[in-house]
Image (tube, rainbow, N blue to C red):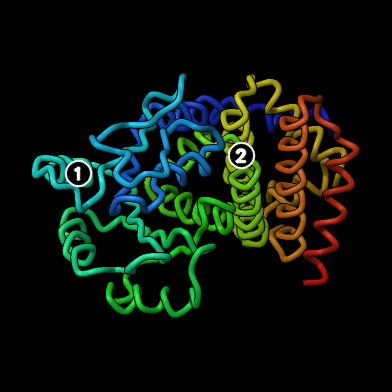
Amino acid sequence: MVKKFEDEVMQTMNKMFENEMKKVNDMLEQDLLISLIGEVNAGKSSTVNKIIGEDIASTNPMPGETVSVDPYNMRGLENIKFMDTPGLNDPNDENPKKTLEFVQKSDVVLFFLNAAGTVFSDSEKEKFTAIEKNNKDILIVLNKIDAAENIPSLIQFVKNHTKNKYKVIPISSKTGENLEDLKREILVMLEKKGKDLLFAKSMKEKSAAATRWIVGAGVSAGIIGASPIPGSDVVPLTSLQVGLIIKLSKLYDKPLSKKAAKDMIVITATQTVGHTIYRQALKFIPGAGSIIGGTVATAMTVALGYGVKYAYENNMAIDYDMIGDLFEKYKQKATKA
């Protein structure tokens, strides 16, 4: 019976592993461009350094350090570019034109405002309007909140003057306050373009991105497991789990073979719920989908994801006993919810 279960999973894996791997590899071959826009001394360079976790952008306490439109990237990730631009009030007439050219091509535009200065001045409003005409994938970064007061009022002021169309993220590139919020919003925006993995790979701290994917996969798994669709639905759930494992392996730069991915899924299933219940959760048996199936599918997918994440972050083999404990934890949590 167990052998038959393994054969069924392996057949499914054979069909989808190459497709999922190709999908992720294609994603990693795309170009990613994030433009950093704002007036001089808005803290653009220091913010990108904090986001990445490395000093890839030169910084200087003197205003106007950036004097040309330059890309920042890292060795091995040359297709990911953080395009730093001169201050919008740069006297060089040519630079604003170049800035708008990059804005048109950008996947995300980070528009910086200085919370300790004149927030959303007339010149900033004018430049923002010009940028908005060329690209609406904008996140407004209200920097230097450590040196300002009444931040909620400043946020509301900016929202009012941008017709509440854009997210305003208050941060401090000096203290690191709310940097995780900014990273999350960038990931959300890039996820819609299939480029979130690219951005996550550029960051030294990858845990938050991995957690986001694991939780998202758990939600999707619950929907699959709970839907009472007649027939076999092994493909959607197994595809989801394979995709998650591949994405995590690429994020942490860990090699992953088809056999290793299959073993992770099969061993996780047999170590947590047993192959019979797993088969029911996948609806090999017509009409087996239920709330119970959704709980099982969610708990197992989340446990598998966190187990793989922990192993990759600590350079160790997969601990399936730990995955079993995680499964029980998340199953009980889902049952009580």
State the residue at coordinates (14%, 47%): 91
Q: Secondary structure at mark 2?
A: loop
Task: Give the mark nearest the N terminus, 1 or 2.
Answer: 1
Residue 318's image quarter?
Answer: top right
Give the camera-side residue of 15 and 58: 58
Q: From the viewer's side, name the closer residue of 176 and 290.
A: 176
Identify the amino acid type marked 2.
Lys
> Residue at left 25%, top 68%?
121
Q: Is residue 287 visible?
A: no
Q: Name the residue that disc number 1 marks.
A: 99
Is 91 above or below relative to 288?
above
Q: Residue at x 83, y 41 (%)?
A: 323
Image quarter (top left, top right, bottom left or bottom right) of the C terminus: bottom right
Frontmost residue, 46 versus 160: 46
Q: Report which residue position mark 2 lands on.
A: 206
Q: Secondary structure at mark 1?
A: helix
